Image (cartoon, rainbow, N blue to C red):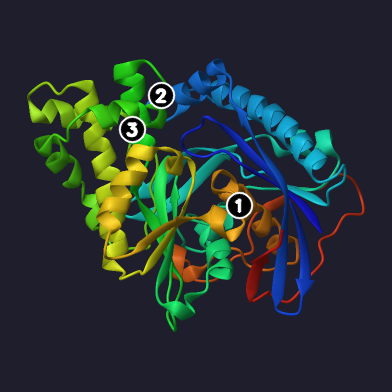
Amino acid sequence: MKIVGLMSGTSYDGVDVVAAEFTRDGETLRLRPLGHRSLDYPDDLRAEIGALLPPAATTIEAVCRLDNRLGEVFAEAAAAGVELAGGTADAVVSPGQTVFHWVEAGRVRGTLQLGAPARVAARVGVPVLHDLRSADVAAGGQGAPLVPAFDALLLDAAGGPRAALNLGGIANLTVVAPGAPVLGYDVGPANALLDAAARRFLDRPCDLDGARAAAGRVHEGLLGLLLAEPYYAAPPPKSTGKELFHGRYLDDRLAALGEPVAADDVLATLTELTARTVADACDRHGVTEVIAAGGGVRNPTLRARLAALAEGRWRLRTTDELGVPAQAKEAYAFALLGWLSWHGLPGAIPSVTGASRAAVLGSWTPSGPGWAATPANPPRRLVVVP
């Protein structure tokens, strides 16, 4: 079965698209990567998304316009994915762009992703799976993270506790260990505050290669204020996003500090915040190896700091060594969730999200009449083949 997976994360800088072929061999599911691409959003679309995200006010008109514009972008991405698949695919997974994740007192009340899936289905002519988080939220879960379903099948816990780390706008961690339930949660900001600072101080979407952070020094006073955030001390299951970690959040901490901080020092401090919170989480779970993916692995300053904090405690690798391109891992994970949903199998893990039951994820937008998914037994292992 060939599935196209799309992913647009909390950094909202573009959409990653992959094509994957899945074949079943007993309890093992084999994933053959067929290719991946990254399509950057134009500047005006990034601005349109940013203008709608909390804490900004918005209108139903703005939401409707953005929903359909994103649908057109995802439709073009899906068409590129079908090309990667050799011209034909069985399904597309288009989870959409998260614009709000409604959390009250640690409980997720709702979540909203935009991306007009009917436009995607009309463009590529195959069924489209979308709205992947709502079923888990309805079962009392966080609706995030969902990638641990992929990590749990891919990682072998027999050699000791291992973790999969994604460094997107938000850093999330999956921990697998012998004889223990899979654990996964959002650790805190990876690139979210770094990108907010780059826009604020550099008038750029990001600090490319962490160059300005490397030129700065960690401001211990600011770091202390940032580390005092209650979210870090909250136990899992938990999830977060730019509803909490946004530009105004950073402004408030800088104002509370009561003294000016140079732009490079702000970026150095935020890099240290990300590295410190991730390393603390890895240490807390006693992992022996961390396998990283996401845009943050392209930041040599962040990656070097993580490696320094890991030294002597755990080994830092990337998913490239397992056959999964680090920049495309989440899109491949969503392709897997599409395979599971197609076969009527749960994609959310209750020990991760806190749901009362394991939910089959997403809603299908058919490409035409007569379509139906095919039930199957769950796989027990995922192997990436060249």
Q: Give the residue pinned by disc 3.
A: 194
Q: Earlier in the sequence, mark 2 or mark 3?
A: 2
Query: Which residue is rendered at x = 42% and y = 41% of the image?
Result: 296
**Closer to the camera in the image, 319 or 167:** 319
Which amino acid, mark 1?
Leu
Q: Do labels 2 and 1 touch, CB within 8 Å?
A: no
Name the secondary structure under disc 3: helix
Q: Which residue is mark 1?
A: 132
Q: Residue at x 37, y 57 (%)?
A: 238
Number of the front mark, 2 or 3: 3
Q: Residue furthest right?
A: 370
Q: Secondary structure at mark 2?
A: loop
Measured as percent of width and height from the top left, residue 239 is found at: 39, 52
Residue that label 2 marks? 57
Q: Nearer the viewer, residue 15 or 352?
A: 15
Name the residue located 27 percent from the left edge and 52 percent from the top edge: 308
Mark 2 crowd level (few <14, some 14–19, many ≥20, 10 Å Cα)? few
Q: Which residue appears farthest toward the bottom when viewing the image?
A: 179
Give how far apart the Cα atoms at labels 2 and 3 are.
Answer: 23 Å
Q: Earlier in the sequence, mark 2 or mark 1?
A: 2
Question: Is 238 on the left or on the right of 31, as rendered?
Answer: left
Q: Could you tell me residue 204's position as x and y percent?
A: 40, 19
Q: Quadrant of the N terminus?
A: bottom right
Vertical comparison of 172 with 219: above or below: below
